[in-house]
Image (cartoon, rainbow, N blue to C red):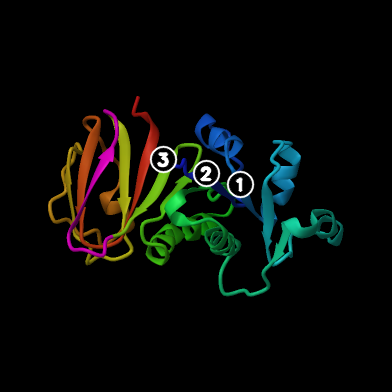
Amino acid sequence: MEERKPKNIVILAAGDFPSHPIPLKTLQEADFVVCCDSAFETIRNEKLGIRNYVVIGDGDSLSETDKAALGDRWIHVSEQDYNDLHKAMLWATSKFKIQNSKFSILGATGKREDHTLGNISYLITFAEEYPGINLEMLTDHGRFCALSSHLSPFIFHLPSFPRQQVSLFTPDPATSITSDGLRWPLRDFHARLWWQATLNEALADSFTLSITGPVILFQSYDPKG
């Protein structure tokens, strides 16, 4: 039996619209786009020809004319405990099975720095809420993903390339990180501050991380010059 190709679902937030070819290609090839309401003006202005989409949020960024024009593409969520990115992910995972989907978050960085930090940290929340989800956040410089472990330790074998820039972040200083294949090895390292496991570099076509808690991984698209 032919293996089913996973659906590519894009969550479009309201940060800087991407200009790098990798996130743009991901958006153009998406099977479905879930657009935060504050990003709707961007998607309309860019004239990307996206047909399969909804717009979701509390509606404070849309005019009544916009809502009427969107019709059943408009998904109103009034609660204020979570931001629009979380609302979009909740809706997307309710409509598309995580076992058969790849979720890519775009437009989540840039503009206000507090939104950027909050959106990146949401990756761990999503990984914990949806174990096994195939989730990435693409920027104009690289890819973020969350590595979450219910075992201790858990080993990740990650594709890379020589001189790829690699940074690690964890919200939990109790998390132990051990690496193999990075220029500056980590051995049972505990990052008490966010910067302490950043700005590393891959040596070959892959590297290995052994972790005991949640970690956000950043990998650059291009090698260090």
| Marks 2/1: CA–CA distance | 7 Å
| Marks 1/3: CA–CA distance | 20 Å
* For marks 2 and 1 on the same chain, the one whose residue lies earlier in the sequence: 2
* Residue at image mark 1: 32
Mark 2 in CB contact with mark 1 (< 8 angstroms)? yes
Q: Which residues are magenta?
A: 149-162
Q: Secondary structure at mark 2?
A: strand
> Residue pushed farthest front?
1
Residue 157 horizontal side relative to residue 35, left or right: left
Residue type at tag 1:
Phe
Asked where in the image residue 194 lies, by quadrant, the reply is: bottom left
| Marks 2/3: CA–CA distance | 15 Å
Q: Which mark is residue 3?
A: 3
Residue 175 horizontal side relative to residue 12, left or right: left
Of badges 2 and 3, nearer the viewer stands: 3
* For marks 2 and 3 on the same chain, the one whose residue lies earlier in the sequence: 3
* Residue at image mark 2: 8
Task: Point out residue 120 in the picture as x, y percentages from the top left corner.
Answer: 45, 55
Q: From the image, which quarter does the C terminus lie in? A: top left
The answer to whether residue 154 is magenta is yes
Mark 2 in CB contact with mark 3 (< 8 angstroms)? no
Q: Which mark is residue 137?
A: none
Residue 4 sits above or below residue 83 on the image = above
